[in-house]
């Protein structure tokens, strides 16, 4: 991979990151009162992703709907840290943290505590209208915090035109990417479809990659073996959640066979 985010990906053509979707955590409406089953569930998913051949993992509080726009409660951070450490103890694969909806500071703190490698920030720069209201990027706070806590080695993957959101004002995608990379200092760019599991427009990916230049561009939603042919020429990597689940259903566990199928298609593209 050109300009790899992680040293482990130096010789990997197109890294594939598998999503670990946490069920609802304590304090969230959907929490069912059983932390042990949550831990068992996410470790089983992590093992299935590893067995399927992914190159990295990303853990996020997917079940904590409705999401806070910015800072999450302290108990969410502590539980995510504990669960992320359990995953880290299980595998040496590069690990990422995403604290939904847009708590980059907490994600960075968790990542540092568990020796993770990268975080995802949905809105790093600019502003979006979302189901949580208007979310404004906090690149200045996040990047200074990264330096203050000695976490410069932890990379920041940031979305451009993030899913489940709309920009407050239409701007050329080239300007948005340029500012995300040059002014907000994102280490990698994520481009997605309109929502979880929705396909990503290959033309948009091409435009984003042209603007991002040497900065890695990852596909953040809707990648399947059937859509890869159009995405592979422009993407540097993939973040996959929905497709890896049994029958592609979000409420199901990870299916190692689907992971293996996807990885085989990506691997063949390197030949």
Image (cartoon, rainbow, N blue to C red):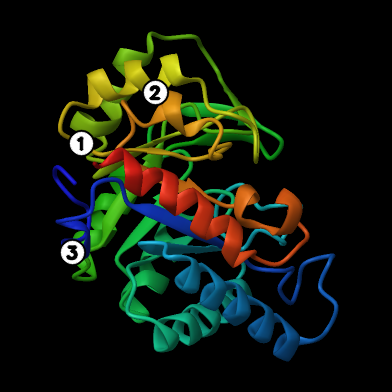
Say whether disc 3 or disc 1 marks the residue closer to the N-terminus: 3
In the image shown, does 182 or 94 lie closer to the viewer?
A: 94
Percent across and percent down for residue 159 are 43, 37
- Give the crowd class for mark 1: few <14, some 14-19, many >=20 residues within 10 Å: some
Q: In the displayed structure, does residue 10 sit left or right of residue 15?
A: left
Q: Earlier in the sequence, mark 2 or mark 3?
A: 3
Residue at image x 49%, y 40%? 220
Q: Quadrant of residue 238?
A: top left
State the mark number for residue 205. Answer: 2
Q: Is residue 113 left or right of residue 99?
A: left
* Percent of width and height locating residue 87: 47, 81
Q: CA distance from mark 1 to mark 2?
A: 13 Å
Mark before the other along the chain sequence, 1 or 2: 2
Kind of element beneath mark 1: loop
**Could you say whether the residue bearing mark 3 is in a helix, strand or loop?**
loop
Give the residue drawn at x 66%, y 52%.
68
Whether 94 is drawn above or below 157: the answer is below
Compared to residue 75, the image places residue 24 above or below, namely above
Question: Which residue has dot 3 on it?
Answer: 153
Location of residue 144 (image quadrant): bottom left
Q: Residues within 10 Å of mark 2 (few under 14, many from 20)?
A: many
Q: Which residue is mark 1?
A: 215
Residue 261 position (above or below residue 109): above
**Residue at (49, 9) in percent of width and height:** 170
């Amino acid at each position: 991979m050109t300009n790899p985010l992680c040293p482990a990906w130096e010789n990997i053509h197109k890294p594939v990151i598998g999503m670990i979707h946490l069920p609802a955590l304590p304090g969230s409406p959907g929490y069912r009162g059983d932390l042990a089953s949550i831990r068992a569930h996410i470790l089983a998913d992590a093992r299935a992703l590893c067995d399927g051949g992914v190159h990295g993992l990303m853990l996020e509080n997917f079940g904590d709907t409705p999401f806070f726009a910015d800072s999450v409660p302290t108990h969410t951070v502590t539980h995510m840290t504990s669960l992320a450490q359990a995953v880290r103890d299980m595998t040496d694969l590069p690990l990422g943290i995403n604290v939904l909806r847009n708590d980059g500071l907490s994600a960075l703190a968790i990542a540092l505590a568990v020796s993770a490698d990268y975080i995802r920030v949905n809105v790093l720069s600019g502003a979006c209208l979302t189901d949580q209201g208007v979310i404004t990027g906090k690149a200045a706070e996040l990047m200074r915090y990264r330096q203050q806590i000695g976490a410069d080695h932890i990379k920041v993957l940031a979305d451009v035109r993030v899913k489940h959101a709309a920009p407050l004002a239409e701007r050329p995608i080239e300007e948005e990417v340029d500012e995300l990379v040059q002014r907000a200092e994102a280490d990698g760019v994520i481009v997605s479809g309109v929502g979880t599991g929705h396909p990503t427009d290959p033309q948009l990916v091409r435009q984003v990659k042209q603007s991002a230049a040497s900065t890695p561009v990852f596909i953040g939603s809707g990648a399947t073996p059937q859509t890869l042919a159009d995405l592979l020429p422009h993407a540097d990597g993939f973040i996959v959640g929905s497709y890896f689940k049994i029958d592609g259903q979000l409420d199901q566990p990870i299916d190692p066979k689907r992971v293996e199928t996807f990885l085989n298609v990506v691997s063949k593209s390197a030949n």
